[in-house]
Amino acid sequence: MHIRVDNALAGLWRAPSDYEVELNDWRCSWDPQFDYVEIENSRLAFAYLTEMIDRGVPPAALSVVRLAGPEAYR
C-alpha cells in the first residue's frame, strides 16, 4: 500500500522525516507526477492519510493506492 501524492496539487509538500518517499521501486521512482509514500501496515493507510492532511497536505493531492504486482508487467 502507498499514499500517492500528486506533486502538482500538493504545492510545496515534502515528506516529513518519519515518512519516506519510495525510491527503491521502479514503478514509484520513475513517476514524475507523483510521490509514493509506502505504508507498511495497510490497515492503517487511512490513518496515515489523515495525518498527512493534518500536517498540511491538501486532501485533493492524496490517494491510497495498491500497486500492481510484478505479474501485471509481463
Image (cartoon, helix red, strand yellow):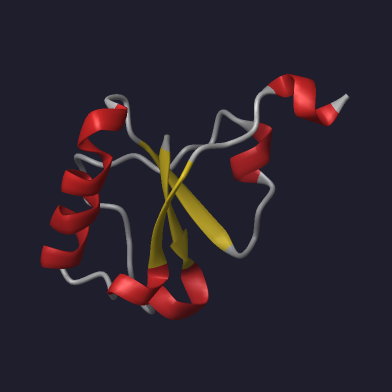
Residue extending furthest toward the front: 43
Residue extending furthest toward the top: 71
- The residue that appears at 19% across and 65% down in the rendered structure is 53
Q: Position of residue 19 (x, y in %)?
A: 27, 42
Specify the quadrant of the image occupied by residue 32.
Answer: bottom right
Specify the quadrant of the image occupied by residue 33.
Answer: bottom right
- The residue that appears at 77% across and 29% down in the rendered structure is 72
Which quadrant does the C terminus fall into? top right
Q: Is residue 27 left or right of residue 42?
A: right
**Residue 19 higher or lower than 32, as above or below:** above
> Can I make out residue 55 in this image?
no
How many numbered discs, if any?
0
**Residue 4 higher or lower than 17, as above or below:** below
- The residue that appears at 34% across and 39% down in the rendered structure is 20
Q: Is residue 59 left or right of residue 18?
A: right
Q: Position of residue 40 (x, y in %)?
A: 31, 25
Q: Position of residue 29 (x, y in %)?
A: 61, 43
- The residue that appears at 42% across and 34% down in the rendered structure is 1
> Can I make out residue 40 in this image?
yes
